[in-house]
Image: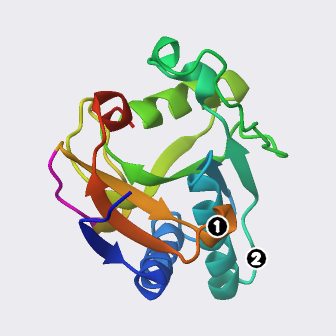
Amino acid sequence: MKEKARIMDDRAMTRAIHRIAPEIIEKNKGTKNVVMIGIQRRGVPIAKLLADHIKLVEGERPPTGMLDITFYRDDLSLLAEHPVINGTDIPFNITGRDIVLVDDVLYSGRTVRAALDALGSIGRADAVQLAVLVDRGHRELPIRADYVGKNLPTSRSEKVVVYLTELGADADAVAIVPAPDAAEEAR
């Protein structure tokens, strides 16, 4: 994909993580009851980075898990005939915990809605907070992030792409690219 603009490089992404982690600690008065759950795929490494930074500040790393929302999506029938399942791995009980749900980009809110449905099938959290690296606007559902690395106004004809070395990219970065078509835009 040809980039229209590179919005964040690895250093800017690190600064965003270092800014969000203390906000999580402050809002929760520590991390005693906090667990981090990343939405597959790009939310998972971001959740791990946040948990690592929280450990540097608090001395203890919050439990971290990963959530696959594939079967909870409202556009499942529009996806490929055999959608890719990345798997859920939450090796702790979420009931009674304060969950920080983590994703890379907040757009329509539909991914978060699906994640909330998926979490509800696993247990009953005391609270669910949302942390995102980028909030690009254009909400279709009444969902907002509690923690945002960067607010990035975009047009619907653009797509925000988060590159992560953990997932095979050459470098960590955030870029704006032209949206190829309406199906891709539904992200």
- Up the image or down, 70 lies above or below 4; here it is above
Q: Main secondary structure of the magenta part?
A: loop
Residue drawn at x 67%, y 31% is 84
Q: How many marks?
A: 2
Location of residue 70 in the rendering, given as x and y in whole percent from the top left corner: 60, 27
The residue where tag 2 is placed is 60
Mark 1: amino acid: Thr
Q: Position of residue 1 (x, y in %)?
A: 39, 57
Q: Nearer the viewer, residue 3 or 187?
A: 3
Q: Is residue 164 above or below residue 138?
A: below
Circle 2/circle 1 CB separation < 8 Å = yes
Looking at this rendering, what residue extends furthest in the right direction?
91
Is 53 displayed left or right of 139 in the figure? right
Camera-side residue of 187 and 2: 2
* CA distance for labels 2 and 1: 8 Å
Task: Please identify the quadrant where the C terminus is shown.
Answer: top left
Nearer-N-terminus badge (2/1): 1
Label 2 environment density (alpha carbons within 10 Å; few <14, some 14–19, many ≥20): some
* Residue 41 horizontal side relative to residue 139, left or right: right
Q: Is residue 102 visible?
A: yes
Kind of residue at disc 2: Glu
Q: On the rendered structure, is 59 left or right of 3?
A: right
Which stretch did the figure color magenta? 151-155
Q: Residue at x 78, y 43 (%)?
A: 90
In x, y percent, where is residue 93?
A: 79, 40
The residue under label 1 is 31
Residue 107 position, x and y percent, is 31, 44
